[in-house]
């Protein structure tokens, strides 16, 4: 699959705009992250002073992409719009299992990383360039889970600024702080996945 | 693997899952270590699966020969996250005439003395498939890796 059309929202005008979902992270995407995302974020953080800390600012996407190359249990997706990468996600489709008791030890798709471009982040800028990039990528993760036979089951470790979205808006189950990783762990059941996909219809 | 993704416009545009209030991000702080462990575990599993098949043995026969539970050999061959016991590695090393030190490093039972074995393991894991019969290229990959583990 490459080039699926996905509608997102332009932040300033609140108009719907068409983005492209690409499977796989290319050199161009890594270039966007290094040469566009990082300088933009650095500049913005300077302007904001000490008010904001960005958990993902040290993420090395190139190292992540290098290490999963050739491994069939990983899938990566990029949402492109306006010629730039607007959001990136890496999924793990093998050997990760549920922790919620009702689906204990059932396989799930684990969201290894999900990051949106800094100009699409609520905590860095208003209005954002594009909205709903993250929710669209979660939709993709659920569909991948369905297609590998996991019926929509998802797991992920949330960055602190996203805890409220996963818990209160996305409807995932909050299993509290995972001491090994220092982040909150969230899981999506089959029913929660079905509800997520049904919501906007 | 290629996926067929279809997101109707209404599902994003009319969704109640608005990200107006929050950013949406997720991350695994231990990602690189976990993937490297997985590659190492996969290399170890494929190695023993190939060596066993090369001798035309079943898991049951190998388990009986070296006095290890069948379940442990099955897990070692198939689960990249499985951590074998030191005794299992000792017996497998002795049976297949491999370096116990290097196998222990590969199984994360001893600290790595050099990057050589790890690098060979990554190459091996990448070059091999899960085919039932050993093809020429698989046999070649196996021989190269075994050479590293015998030195």
Image: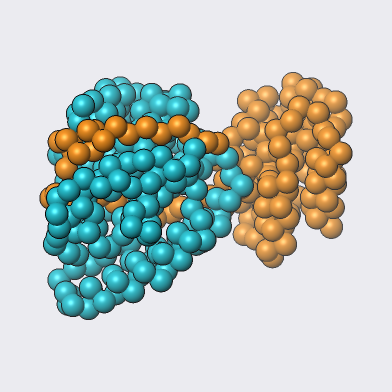
| Frontmost residue, A132 versus A153 | A132
| Frontmost residue, B65 versus A100 | A100
Split into 4 quadrants, where in the image is the C terminus of chain A?
top left
Query: Residue, x 40% and y 44% (percent of image)?
Result: A21
Q: Please identify the quarter of the rendering in which residue A186 is found.
A: top left
Picture coordinates of residue B20, whole percent (x, y) = 14, 49
Residue A75 seen in the figure: yes
Q: How is the image coloured?
A: by chain
Picture coordinates of residue B119, whole percent (x, y) = 69, 58
Query: Residue, x 58% and y 51% (percent of image)?
Result: A69
The chain coloured cyan carries which letter? A
Above or below A50: residue B109: above
Picture coordinates of residue A93, whole percent (x, y) = 48, 36
Going by the image, does A75 lie left or right of A101?
Answer: right
Q: Please identify the quarter of the rendering in which residue B82 is found.
A: top right
Going by the image, does B22 lie left or right of B132?
Answer: left
The chain coloured orange carries which letter? B
| Frontmost residue, B120 versus B20 | B20
What count of labels does the image hold? Answer: 0
Going by the image, does A130 lie left or right of B108?
Answer: left
Residue B85 seen in the figure: no
Query: Residue, x 33% and y 47% (percent of image)?
Result: A19
Going by the image, does A35 lie left or right of B123?
Answer: left
Above or below A140: residue A47: below
């Amino acid at each position: 699959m490459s080039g699926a059309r996905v509608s997102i929202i332009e932040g300033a005008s609140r108009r719907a705009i068409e983005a492209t979902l690409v499977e796989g992270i290319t050199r161009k995407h890594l270039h966007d992250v290094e040469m566009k995302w990082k300088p933009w974020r650095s500049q913005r953080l300077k302007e904001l002073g000490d008010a904001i800390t960005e958990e993902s600012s040290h993420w090395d996407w190139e190292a992540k992409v290098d290490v999963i190359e050739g491994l069939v249990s990983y899938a990566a997706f990029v949402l492109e719009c306006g010629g730039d990468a607007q959001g990136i996600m890496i999924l793990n489709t093998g050997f990760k299992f549920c922790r919620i008791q009702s689906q204990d030890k059932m396989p799930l798709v684990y969201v290894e990383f999900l990051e949106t471009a800094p100009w699409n982040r609520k905590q860095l800028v208003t209005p954002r360039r594009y909205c709903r990039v993250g929710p669209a990528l979660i939709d993709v993760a659920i569909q991948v889970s369905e297609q590998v036979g996991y019926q929509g089951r998802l797991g992920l470790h949330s960055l602190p600024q996203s805890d409220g979205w996963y818990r209160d808006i996305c409807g995932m189950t909050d299993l509290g702080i995972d001491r090994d990783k220092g982040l909150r762990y969230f899981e999506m059941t089959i029913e929660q996945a079905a509800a997520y996909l049904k919501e906007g219809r | 693997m290629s996926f067929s993704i279809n997101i109707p416009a209404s599902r994003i545009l009319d969704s109640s899952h608005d990200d107006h209030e929050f950013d949406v991000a997720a991350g695994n702080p231990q990602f690189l270590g976990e993937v490297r462990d997985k590659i190492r575990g996969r290399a170890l599993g494929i190695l023993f699966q190939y060596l066993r098949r090369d001798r035309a043995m079943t898991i049951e026969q190998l388990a009986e020969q070296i006095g290890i539970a069948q379940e442990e050999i099955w897990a070692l061959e198939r689960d990249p996250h499985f951590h074998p016991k030191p005794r299992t590695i000792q017996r497998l090393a002795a049976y297949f005439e491999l370096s116990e030190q290097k196998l222990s490093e590969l199984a994360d039972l001893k600290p790595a003395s050099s990057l050589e074995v790890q690098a060979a393991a990554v190459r091996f894991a990448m070059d091999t498939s899960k085919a039932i019969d050993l093809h020429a290229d698989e046999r070649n990959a196996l021989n190269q890796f075994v050479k590293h583990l015998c030195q």
